[in-house]
Amino acid sequence: MSLISSFLGGRRSNVFDPFSLDVWDPFKDSPFPNSLSSSFPEFSRQNSAFVSTHVDWKETPEAHVFRADIPGLKKEEVKVEIEDDRVLQISGERNVEKEDKNDTWHRVERSSGKFMRRFRLPENARVDQVKASMENGVLTVSVPKEDTKKPDVKAIEISG
């Protein structure tokens, strides 16, 4: 498996996404104080529930379709917004589970807190017609594409 494939969680893709606005901090687990995480606490692990919220983006002939895995959240806990005219932002928050003083926790692996993913949409996106739905922990956002006008072709008779 290539480095890119393993970085993408085993998916077979070596496509660089020029539209993504995701900020990756290669030094987030570094002991050095000048990493992005320490400079911007909103990117730190304690404040980000779904640092690796997985989002698939595919383009069909009709639309750009985004699918995000956000298990355990209700649609009221998720926001889908278009900002600055061409930036799709998906965000939300999972609240910390209430603790009972009589409970003994053996393992805590589920994240809580806020998440946010942003994607710069291409010029052909119809941002005024975006639709979103959620089913079984998967958010689907559909951004229709502008109709591509096929050039009018007129046959010219050749004389002679």
Image (tube, rainbow, N blue to C red):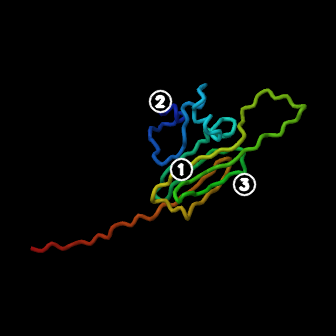
Viewer-nearest of discs 1 and 3: 1
Which badge, 3 or 2, comes first in the chain's sequence? 2
Type of amino acid under label 1? Phe
Type of amino acid under label 2? Leu
Q: Is mark 1 on a helix, strand or loop?
A: strand
Dot 1: few (<14), some (14–19), or many (≥20) neighbours within 10 Å?
A: some
| Residue topped by disc 3 | 76
Type of amino acid under label 3? Glu
Q: Residue 93: x and y, percent?
A: 71, 46
Which badge, 1 or 3, comes first in the chain's sequence? 3
State the CA–CA distance, disc 3 to disc 2: 37 Å
Q: Residue sitting at 61 percent across and 50 percent down?
A: 90
State the CA–CA distance, disc 1 to disc 3: 21 Å
Q: How many marks?
A: 3
In the figure, is residue 83 to the left or right of 122? right
| Viewer-closest of 39 and 56 | 39
| Residue topped by disc 2 | 3
Q: Are marks 1 and 3 in contact (CB under 8 Å)?
A: no
Dot 2: few (<14), some (14–19), or many (≥20) neighbours within 10 Å?
A: few
Q: Residue 72: x and y, percent?
A: 72, 44
Residue 119 lies, with reference to residue 104, above or below; the image says: below
Q: Residue sitting at 67 percent across and 47 percent down?
A: 137
Q: What element carries label 2?
A: helix
Q: Residue 78: x and y, percent?
A: 68, 51
Q: Are marks 3 and 2 in contact (CB under 8 Å)?
A: no
State the CA–CA distance, disc 1 to disc 2: 23 Å
Viewer-nearest of discs 1 and 2: 1
Q: Residue sitting at 55 percent across and 46 percent down?
A: 56
| Residue topped by disc 1 | 119
